[in-house]
Amino acid sequence: MSPPPPLLRKEAAPDWAALPPELLALVAERLHHSVDYVRFRSVCSRWRAAARRIPFPPLLALPFDPDAAALPFFDPSEIASSAAVHSLPLPEARHQALLGSSRGWLFLIDEAGSVSLLNPFTRARFCLPPVTESLARASSLSVSKVRDRWVLDHRNGKHPVTLYHMRSTFISEATLSSSPSEGDECAVIIVAVLASSTKLAFCRIGDREWTLFNTALHNFVSSVAYCDGRFYAVDAFGEVCVCDVGISTRATYISSLMVPPERDSFRIIGLKKELLLVAHYMDGDFPHFKHHYEIYRTDIKRRMKWYRVDTIGGRTVFLSVHFNSNAIGGAFYGCKSNAMYFSEPIRGGREPSRSQIHKMAVMDVTNGCLEVISCNCNVQFSREVFWFTPCLY
């Protein structure tokens, strides 16, 4: 009879937290996608400390189901991969509508009109002042509250303001002066673009109400950007004003910033010391419109004047077609340089595409060539999508 086998010694599980910081830093530097980076930092405090700050490209927030508890998004750096679409658990956004994003923070609103800021990665959240009748009145709308729900007062009667109609009734989007995670959260200023108004509203974290102010513009404000301590607003005509928001809020029309007439829409983007303006217009006959985009820049430290440019210096612009959630950066892994990434295909009007698969577009700024890319995501809910920059700290 053979002797019994010797007892096998059970080896201890490796202590991954004890890896040298130098090795962890080398691994973190090879993480090119924000999803992998978040997973790496979530292992433990030592891994989190070893991961230096890396600029990641904005993510495309895809059509959102307010009854679900997850936000689908598309990573443009993974276009060549079939796994470019991810889902981020977001129970905090259940039964709420998204009002776009600024500096990686999502703006949320519910049917009662409560507004909040949410970082979808760190889960940090701040309450903002709720919407009021005065915000709707600034867009020439009359509303009232019935059993904690807003209704629109119309000559044909009262109509409930659903989640889908919150943007077209109260706040369409908002812009932050800085990220609340970067310093004193109470110093952060939030400027809100109203549904259809020449006025803007602002607040700080901790305020109880929004403060309205005039912009001195002649048409509805379409886009707002923050640059070097001040907010800049552009209206549907391409006119620009600078807004000093604070104890004595005032807006000053900038007459020197004029663009060619007959442009259909404008988006303004703030950098450290300069502004970019993206102008869009169409020509041709329906349905064969030809779309044109022009880029202008100005240095805010000199005499402010738009100069048309045919290059953005190797950088990449991410433009939300129906939101003010725009971004610009350079040397993003997996993204084309000197290009504009549009949140959706460029079409005439606002009618949704017949396709059930969401698509985005990439344009080469130098030659205007356009490429349409499938995001491999079914369009089942609101088709208005937007870019948001990961704020991972």
Image (tube, rainbow, N blue to C red):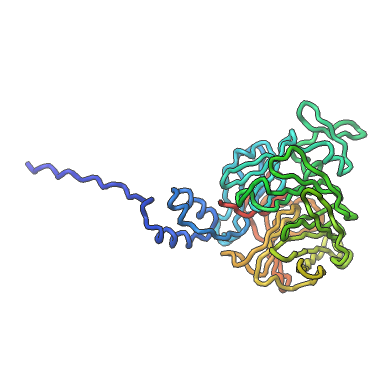
Q: Is residue 164 visible?
A: yes
Between residue 157 and residue 136, name the one nearer to us: 136
Q: Tell which residue pokes out farthest to the front in this image.
A: 247
Residue positioned 70% across, 57% down in the render: 326
Q: Position of residue 119 (x, y in %)?
A: 61, 46
Q: Nearer the viewer, residue 206 or 280?
A: 206
Pick out the residue farthest to the left: 1
Residue 280 found in image quarter: bottom right
> Looking at the rendering, in which quadrant would you find the N terminus?
top left
Compare residues 376 and 384 and report the one nearer the observer.
Answer: 384
Instruction: Give the residue at x 67% y 62%.
Output: 328
Residue name at image x 63 percent, y 57 percent? 58
In this view, 331 is above or below 225: below
Farthest-out residue, right = 155
Q: Quadrant of residue 234?
A: bottom right
Image label count: 0
Residue 120: give x, y in percent of width and height: 60, 46
Is any part of residue 383 visible from this angle?
A: no
Q: Nearer the viewer, residue 217 or 111?
A: 217
- Looking at the image, is 64 positioned above or below residue 257? above
Q: Is residue 21 left or right of residue 338?
A: left
Q: Residue 220 at x, y = what percent? A: 86, 52
Give the left or right position of residue 43, taking residue 302 as reference: left
Residue 335 image offset from top left, x and y in percent:
61, 65
Image position of 30 (left or right of 309)? left
